[in-house]
Image (spheres, coloured by chain):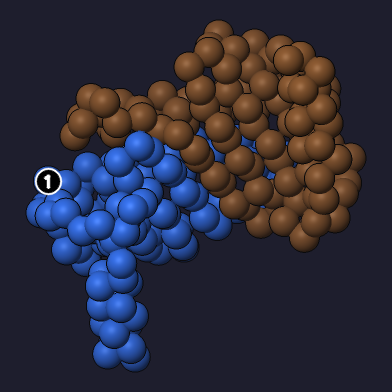
Chain colours: A brown, B blue
Amino acid sequence: MAAQIEETLKRIQTSDGVVGLVIFNNDGIPIKTNMDNAMSVRYAGLVQQLIATSQVEIKKDDPNDNLTYLRLRTTDNEIMVIPDKHYTMVVIQKPTGSRSPM
Amino acid sequence: MAAQIEETLKRIQTSDGVVGLVIFNNDGIPIKTNMDNAMSVRYAGLVQQLIATSQVEIKKDDPNDNLTYLRLRTTDNEIMVIPDKHYTMVVIQKPTGSRSPM
């Protein structure tokens, strides 16, 4: 199983334009990342805030509703967020598919 | 020009699965909506928070970077956000393309 996960993460990391990948736990602590710690913690912090803010509002209509995916497109990057019960994965990609060091 | 905008909004509103559309100004006041006021104001409030939180973090790396698009996928809905200088548009769509009153 672990090998399969590593393989999948490797595939994502080496996809065109991907400049960063971080997985963090529900405490916002990066447990897997290919970026430096400061950047990883910053993305975890931002994403945790966005998820928390969204979940509060989303659940007002339907307590069973859940955020399953979040995507931010900025002029420079595309930030894709996959929240799950215990972990959240964030992938940062250059929209033009160009690679630049993070 | 106004007719063209109306036409575009009509086309979006009648697209498959679209259950809500709201445009609000930078004060969070809905100026165009096909939902009731309470729901429109709620979406405007949520989206304003998400945009503000994102912009602060995004601009730390590059002050010229800007959020150009935000998409939330929940179990029940897909929320698409197009922020601009003076107005922000939010489109709420049922992922399965089914229409249910908002």
Percent from the top left, x then y, of residue B66?
60, 53
Quadrant housing residue B35: bottom left
Residue indicated by mark 1: B38
Percent from the top left, x then y, of residue A81?
57, 35
On-image quarter of the N terminus of chain B: bottom left
Q: Label 1 is found on which chain of the structure?
A: B
Q: Amino acid at mark 1?
A: Ala
Decide: is A73 above or below A24: below
Task: Tell me the SS state at disc 1.
Answer: helix
Decide: is A38 above or below A90: above
Percent from the top left, x then y, of residue B2?
29, 87
**Is residue A42 in view?**
no
Percent from the top left, x then y, of residue B61?
73, 39
Quadrant housing residue B88: bottom left
| Residue at position x 23%, y 25% in the image | A63
Q: Is residue B58 left or right of residue A33?
A: left
**Is residue B72 in view?**
yes
| Residue at position x 59%, y 52% in the image | A73
